[in-house]
Structure formats: C-alpha cells, structure tokens
Amino acid sequence: MSFIKTKMSSYVMFRLPEAAEYSVVRLAADEPEKLYSAGALSGKSGFVFASFFPSQEHPVLLFATDEISILPLPPAEMPQAGQTEIVCRDDRRRQYAADFTRFHRELAAGNFAKLVLSRCCEVETAVSLSPETLFMRACHLYPSMFVALISAPESGTWLMATPEILVETAGTEYRTIALAGTMKGKRDAADWSLKNREEQRYVAAYIRECLKGIAADITEREAQTVRAADLLHLRSDFTFRLNDGQTIGSLLEALHPTPAVCGLPKDKARRFILSNESVAREYYSGFAGITGVCGTTQLYVTLRCMQIDGRKCRLYAGGGLLPSSTEQQEWDETEAKMQTMMRCLCAEQNTENDV
C-alpha cells in the first residue's frame, strides 16, 4: 500500500487529557509554517507537529491558532459489535526480524546502551472512515490521553492518542516525564521485570542529565506504575524552572528525541536508526501540541498513532531494546501498542475505562 501526500486543506483537531471539549484549528492559508529544528520554536506560538528528525522532507509544522474553535465533544459513532472492518493487513514480520537482529547485534557489542526499534502495520478497511469520525472515537475510548488529528499537505493525515508528556508548563514551572517499560495488565500495580525497570532508569537518567545544564529547582518523583488503555508503564515526573537565557527551543533540542523513542547515546542512536530501521518514521515518535498559546505549552510525544489515507491506515509502534531483549517479546509489545489505534477501526475492543 502506498501513501501519497495530495493537496489538501490544513487543519488540526485536538482534545487535551480529561477535557470535555475539543479544539479545531483551520488555516486561512493552505499551509502551516515550516521550521527545520525543534530549537526554531523559541518565541513561536501555535500548534506544533514535529517529526522524529526534522528535515526538508519532514519539517516541524506550526499551525497558527489565531482562529481556534472550542467545541463540546459529541457522542462518538463507535463500530458496531461483530463488525469486522479490516479487509487487508500487512505486518512485515520478516522485515522486523531482520531489523531486530541488526539492532540487537549493536547492543550485544556494547555500541549502545539502548535502541528503540519501530515498525508499522498497514491495514485497509472495508469502508472509508472519515478522519473526524476516527478522532471522535479516540476521544471516547481514551479520555486520559492527548488525542489529536493533524492534516497538512506536508505530512498527510495523522491520528494519535498518546500518554506521554514531552513538556508542559504551569506559569514559570515546567514538567516532563520519563515514561518507559510496557506490560499488559488490569491493575495499577505491576511486578516489573528487570529489563523494564532498567529501561525506565535509562530514560530518567537521561532527562536528569539534560536538565542539569539548563534548569534549576529540579524535583523528581519516584517511578510509579501508570495505565494507558490496557497497557501499564513506569513513569517518573520531573518539575523544574528554566535558567535565565534558556528557552522552550533549547529545552526541546535537549529532550527530543528522548531515549523512550530513540536510544542512548542519543545522537549516535538517532543516526543509527535513520540509517538502519526499515520503517520511515516520518512524524511517528516526534511531538505535537500547543506552545506559547495564552502563555501555555502542552507538548506530547507522538506515540500510539496512525497515518490515514482513505481506506488505508498505517499504524506505528516501537519498543526499547536492551541486550536482554528477545525478538518475540518485543514484537508482542508492538502488537499490544498498535491496539490503541486498531480499536478506533474495529469493534469489540476494550476501552480505557474497562481495564
């Protein structure tokens, strides 16, 4: 299945976690502003959609929010029980196995402490579902997640329901989180494996080190188990204030991409991923949200997402690899993560409130 970026009007729909309303941004001009680094967001305001690696092909998109509508969430048109809408699915299993072998070899050799390997699954539905319908379904299914639908000629159309905060502000105080480790569960407590705990510690240590040079009044909460749909994760919360002379742009340059979506060491890991991962991530594992709007910034890592093109949808997921990782376990983790978007397409799936 091929995904072709066609000429379209640019718009954004988003719903903040736990909100009873959603926001719509439509541009008077055809295109959002294009930027080519996270640092270029300093002094800017609007809705941001950034790629894993900002470039000429996949720029940071900035949607002006001068005219924004805030509307109450209507009831969602959910799939009917017993209805099967998926008529074609391509998981690229062999491709993932080859990628895993290549990534794991580097970890075993000690060249990286951690690498995140992602994959995609392409599905085709029996009927064409409007992106707006899928957005409303995601809002209904995942009330505690950040849900966004973004469409622009440069990016195509993307839907996400993500649990991971990259940066948010409350006055002069900033907040970020270290989110890593994944397991299925129906309780808010979990017996975490050594691999999951080690993975989360890597992310927390990286954030701690990033903040040392640019922030003050740093506080870190002990890692706790949190739930996102039917998956459990380990999360540490950080609050801090930026030092004089530091900006949102310099903070984003330091944090993005975090080891939760990239690896360690960061720059070396990102270069390796771009050269060796079979999947072109594009905007998956980037970030999205508002910055500088009414003095507020709320940015989220683009996880649990899919690209939409009529009846065709490309779902993305990834997992952190350590030397102790096994291919089947990592594959199963990506399968579980893809269920977040699959529930928006198919009937008979649990909602976030069911687990």
Image (cartoon, rainbow, N blue to C red):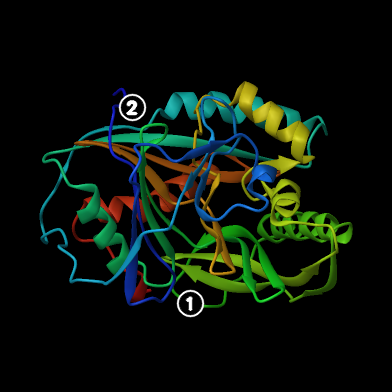
Residue 177 versus residue 247 in the image, above or below: below
Could you tell me which residue is drawn at 89 percent across and 57 percent down? 213
Residue 276 versus residue 324 in the image, above or below: above
Quick one: SS at disc 1?
Answer: loop
Quick one: SS at disc 2?
Answer: loop
- Do we see residue 180 in this rendering? yes
- Do we see residue 321 in this rendering? no
Q: Give the percent coordinates (x, y) of residue 199.
A: 70, 54
Q: Quadrant of residue 152?
A: top left
Q: Give the percent coordinates (x, y) of residue 216.
A: 86, 69
Q: Which residue is mark 2?
A: 5
Q: Amino acid at mark 2?
A: Lys
Residue 32 versus residue 234 in the image, above or below: above
Residue 328, disc? none
Seen from the viewer's position, the closer of residues 182 and 329 is: 182
Q: Give the percent coordinates (x, y) of residue 91.
A: 37, 32
Q: Quadrant of residue 111?
A: top right
Picture quarter with the N terminus: top left
Seen from the viewer's position, the closer of residues 4 and 95 is: 4
Q: Marks 2 and 1, Cα distance to the nearest angstrom? A: 42 Å
Q: From the viewer's perspective, tell me whether residue 219 is left or right of residue 275.
A: right
Q: Amino acid at mark 1?
A: Arg
Instruction: Report crowding for label 1: few under 14, some 14 to 19, many 20 or more residues within 10 A (C-alpha).
Output: few
Q: Nearer the viewer, mark 2 or mark 1?
A: 2
Instruction: Report crowding for label 2: few under 14, some 14 to 19, many 20 or more residues within 10 A (C-alpha).
Output: few
Q: Which residue is mark 1?
A: 187
Seen from the viewer's position, the closer of residues 306 and 328 is: 306
Q: Give the percent coordinates (x, y) of residue 18.
A: 41, 76
Residue 298 versus residue 31 in the image, above or below: below
Could you tell me which residue is drawn at 38 percent across and 76 percent down? 19
Could you tell me which residue is drawn at 50 percent across and 29 percent down? 96
Q: From the viewer's perspective, tell me whether residue 196 is left or right of residue 339.
A: right
